[in-house]
Each structure stands twice: as C-alpha cells, then as structure tokens.
Image (cartoon, rainbow, N blue to C red):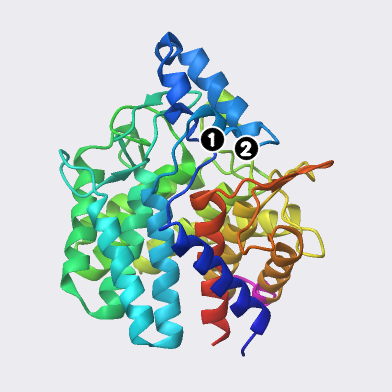
Amino acid sequence: MRDPNLEQALDALLQWCRARNFAGHDPFDALNSRIFRATPLTRSETARLVWTQIIKRSPINLRRLAGVPAQKNAKGIALFALAALANYRRLETTKAESEARDLLDELIGLKISGYSGAAWGYSFDWQSRHFFAPRGTPMIVPTAFAACALLQAADTFRDQRYLEIARSSCEFILHDLKRTVETEDEVCFSYSPIDHTCVFNASLLAAETLASVGAVTGENGFCELAMRAGRYVVKRQRGDGAWAYGAAANQAWVDNFHTGYVLQSLSRIMNSCPGAESHEFGDALERGYKFWRERFFLADGWPKYYDDALYPADTHSAAAAIVTLLELRPLDSGALSLAEKIAAWLLNNMRDSSGFFYYQRERFYTVRAPFMRWSQAWTTYALARLLEERG
C-alpha cells in the first residue's frame, strides 16, 4: 500500500541527511567541545558528567557556541544502512542498491582497530554514571547495530564479504568484552572492554549478535552462549513484566526504547536458536511486550519516554518503537496499526518544515535540535521499515 505522506517525509528526511553527508550532532557529544577540552575540567569525572548533562538538556542547542563539531556516528551510519537496505528490498532500484552499499562501505571504514574482531564505538568521549569511555573505545551497542546491518546486507545482496565482517564482530564479543556475571547457566556481557556494568539491553545485543551470526554460520556454541545471556536478563524481569535499565541500584529506571531493545533481542535469540530450550523465554517476552505496549503509548500514538511520566515525548523512542512493533508483529495483530499511529504522531508533532525531526517535546517547549543519530537515523530506519512492511 502506497502512502504519499510517509514516502514524501522519508524522501525529504533523506535529502536533508544527504546534504550533510550523514554527519551531525548527538545528545551525548558535549565532551567534544573545543571550549571544554581547553580547560582542566576534562580531568574531572563530575565536571564531565555535569557538562554533558547541561549541553544535553538545554532547550537551546549550545553546541555551535561551545565548539562541538558535527561528526559521523557509527551507530547512526548503521541505522542509515539498515534503512537503505529496507528501501532497496522495497524498490529494487540501482540507486537504492548504490546508496546501501555506499553506507555499508562507510560503516566498514569506521571500524576500530586493535581488538580481536570488528568493533565500533562513538565519535565522542562519553561519561556515564559508571565509567568514562574515551573516543575510540569500542562499545557493544554500535557494534551490534553494525553487525545487524552487515548480516542483512549479506542476505540481501548474497555477498559473503559482509558476513565475514559480521562474523568477526563475534570475536570482539567473545574475547574483548568482559563477562561481568558468569555461571553455568547465565552470563552478562559488559558494555565495553573497559567497564564492569550489567546493562540488560547491552548484554542482550551481544547475545543477539552471537545468535544471529551463529544461525547463519552454523556455530552452535554461539547460540548456547546467547541463551545463557538471555537467561540472565529474563531472570531479572520485574513482576509486572518490565525490565530496569540495569542491575545497579542507580539503573532502576524503565524507559521506552531500551525496553524495546530487550524485546527485540529476546525475539531474535528465540528465532535464531530453535529448539524447546528457547521457549523458556516466551512467557517473559509476552509479559514484557504487554507491559511495554500498555504503559508507553497513548491512544493517538504519543510515545512516552518513561513508563510513569508523559514527558518528554522523544523522537528516538517513537522511531525505535515503530521498529520494535514491526519486529514483533507475530505477538500482536494490532502492532502495525499502532506503528502507523506513532508514525503519524511523529509527522504531525516532531517534523520540521525543512524535513528533519526534532529531539524532544517537553510540557512547555520543544527541543528542536536536529540530532543525526538519535532522531534522523532512527526515523529514517523506522519510516523505511514501515513502508517496506506495507509492501
């Protein structure tokens, strides 16, 4: 079914992104500030965290004033590549194939060297509540999205080169990530080679990558390890079906898109690891999906960021929710309808007249910063997948 509004919105957004060569700012790029980097505050964990939050939360985009350069982000490029692959599968044109392959080449060029396998990171120093990661530190989240794009490309184009690089990312997971929890039945992967955190969605993204690659290469050991990682997260599901962000006391919040990541990863692990054992995740997936579906969306498609608050309404949450709903359609006959409502909400509430999408809506104002990875890449992917799903 053709939808001129969605197609026009996607075309305008892609035109806006192409004009900037898919480079831009990010909610977490404050530590790239030339002003901040010229001060001794760069050595202070507290100062790094406070500066990041000031720049991130400001209703006015302070990045140009602070000297934060626009850059390409590996996860953003992976999302644009996934969108381009969806466009190619729908359109089957030479132009669509060329854009997909160009983005995949760009993604491959952003690999970080010096590790056991292919890995990707962020284009900025990052200070979280638990650890500091200098620019160039490989992270499992961008690595998993890159591997996902490469696996899809290998299948779509029947190109072994992409599969080989995706397979290489498993070596990074196996040998460079820490196993912050490991028992005979469970395992939890760290976020990066330098931290010891237990972040549920991040560990599952490592597991999903192992399971997805193993399903193609026939390496059953990958599936066994993925099942153990899935088991660790499933056993820490709350009684109401929700998952906190992580295991630490200060990681107890529940948000929309990280919950969606958990649901997608569990579903992909189950689909990649056939057999009776994988069905142990089925009940957790259904309860988690029910909580997410009922607690994060209003009737008109408004996507809440947190389960217990109306604001902020966030473009990333909306776009990631569309992708999650399309991935989990077998669980919910109304998934496509809700995805369409969310897309309509995005177009009506978060779209600028020039084609890009805003960051967030707060109660009394809208943050119009045009973040390339957070908002544009995710929305490009979501709209491309929705149009592909409609056929």
Query: Does residue 277 lie above or below 228 as drawn?
Result: below
Q: Element under label 2?
A: loop
Q: In this figure, what is the number of numbered marks?
A: 2
Per the image, is 175 magenta?
no
Residue type indicated by callout 1 = Arg
Instruction: Write the start and end of the magenta stretch as one range.
Output: 330-336
Q: Is residue 191 left or right of residue 244?
A: left
Query: Does residue 95 lie above or below 161 as drawn?
Result: below
- The residue carrying mark 1 is 64
Per the image, is 335 magenta?
yes
Q: Element under label 1?
A: helix
- What residue lies at 69% left-to-right and 59% top-to-bottom? 293
Closer-to-camera residue (206/358): 358
Q: Is residue 249 left or right of residue 119?
A: right
Residue type indicated by callout 2 = Asn
Closer-to-camera residue (298/220): 298
Q: How far across and how far down the image is residue 325, in percent?
A: 60, 67
- What residue lies at 23% left-to-right and 51% top-to-bottom? 170
Q: Say which mark, if any, is on residue 174.
A: none
Q: Choose top left, top right, bottom left or bottom right for residue 124.
A: top left
Q: How far across and how far down the image is residue 190, in percent?
A: 36, 35
The image quadrant where one finds the C terminus is bottom right
Closer-to-camera residue (37/85): 37
Q: How far across and how far down the image is residue 342, in percent?
A: 70, 65
| Residues at marks 2 and 1 touching, judged by CB atoms closer than 8 Å | yes
Regarding residue 41, the answer to whether it shows in the image is yes
- The residue carrying mark 2 is 61
Report the mark closest to the observer, 2 or 1: 1
Query: Does residue 163 lie above or below 370 as drawn?
Result: below
Query: Does residue 305 lie above or below 211 as drawn?
Result: above
